[in-house]
Image (spheres, rainbow, N blue to C red):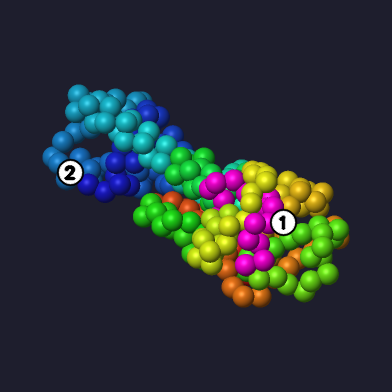
Amino acid sequence: MKYTQLRSFHAVARDGSFTRAARNLNVSQPTVTEQVRELEATYAIELFNRTQRQVRLTTVGRSLYEITQRFFGIVDETDEFLRAAADYGAGHLRVSSVLPFFIVGILTAFRQQHPQVKVSVAAGNSATTRKSLLAYESDVGILADHDPDHRLFTHIHDSHALVAIVSRRHPWAQRPGISLSDLDGQPMVLREVGSNTRRAFETAAAGAGVSPTMVLEIESGEAIREAVAEGHGIGVYGERSLPIDPRLKVLPFTDVNVRLNRYLACLKERRNEYLVAAFFRVADQSR
């Protein structure tokens, strides 16, 4: 049995005419007639009672038509799904990212290549972004350093140094840099638990025997900068994540090199989905 034979039978049974079936299939009537005859000959059955004026299904033909209705219903559904999957003019890409302003350049390049795709961006720390990916609430994510997870596909997008920031009114504002030990006992404004910036800093501080004093814990990078600018304490930040702010002085660490990585991430099972793969490709090209 060939697909074309079954398709011709189904069209004739549906349309009640070899002529109409051929027209709807956009093939010649002899082609439809021959394909139905070949199907009947292959199984030594008769599917239609043919008269000069009309075509009627036999008992076997009616039973086969019930099957082909289900079969071609699935075929049509499959075709619609694949066309929708290939046409991302109405597509929607959901991105979850640490420091969303960091990915504006990637989004610009992505939308240039896929101008009809709707893109939504959610902000959160790495723990939040990871949960969003695992819950299928985001398609792709931008993570900072994180614990390995076998369910995720990740690769490093970039790496940058951890630096301290102080207000321009702070006594250290005239320094070119500081040592990690300078922070012992100093008031600090830090991100929330779950932030990889905080985890990287606390790991380095503990290793050096440094015990700063946390005076504020804030779940927002922007709020950290505002608090530091207002003089509440010293902050730490990823160097490449800092926007230009004349109210702040950046102080590199002179005795340690703490690096923060940023990763592109998605569920392993979704790695080859069209929009996910397209985002990864554009992001890699934008580095």
Question: Can residue 208 be seen in this snapshot?
Answer: yes
User: For this view, does 243 lie left or right of residue 151?
Assistant: right
The residue nearer to you, when weighing 49 against 223, is 223
Residue 41 is tagged as 2
Task: Give the magenta part as a residue range.
Answer: 181-197
Q: Residue at x 77, y 59 (%)?
A: 166
Q: Residue at x 19, y 28 (%)?
A: 60
Q: Residue at x 52, y 61 (%)?
A: 206
- Mark in the foreground, 1 or 2: 1
Q: Earlier in the sequence, mark 1 or mark 2?
A: 2
| Quarter that holds the C terminus | bottom right
User: For this view, does 13 lie left or right of residue 281?
Assistant: left
Q: Residue at x 57, y 62 (%)?
A: 210
User: How far apart are the two marked residues, 1 and 2, measured between alpha carbons?
Assistant: 87 Å
Q: x, y percentage for residue 193? A: 55, 46
The residue nearer to you, when weighing 180 against 127, is 180
Q: x, y percentage for residue 254? A: 66, 75
Dot 2 crowding, Cα within 10 Å, few <14, some 14–19, many 20+:
few
- Say which residue label 1 marks: 234
In the image, farthest residue toward the left:
44
Dot 1 crowding, Cα within 10 Å, few <14, some 14–19, many 20+:
many
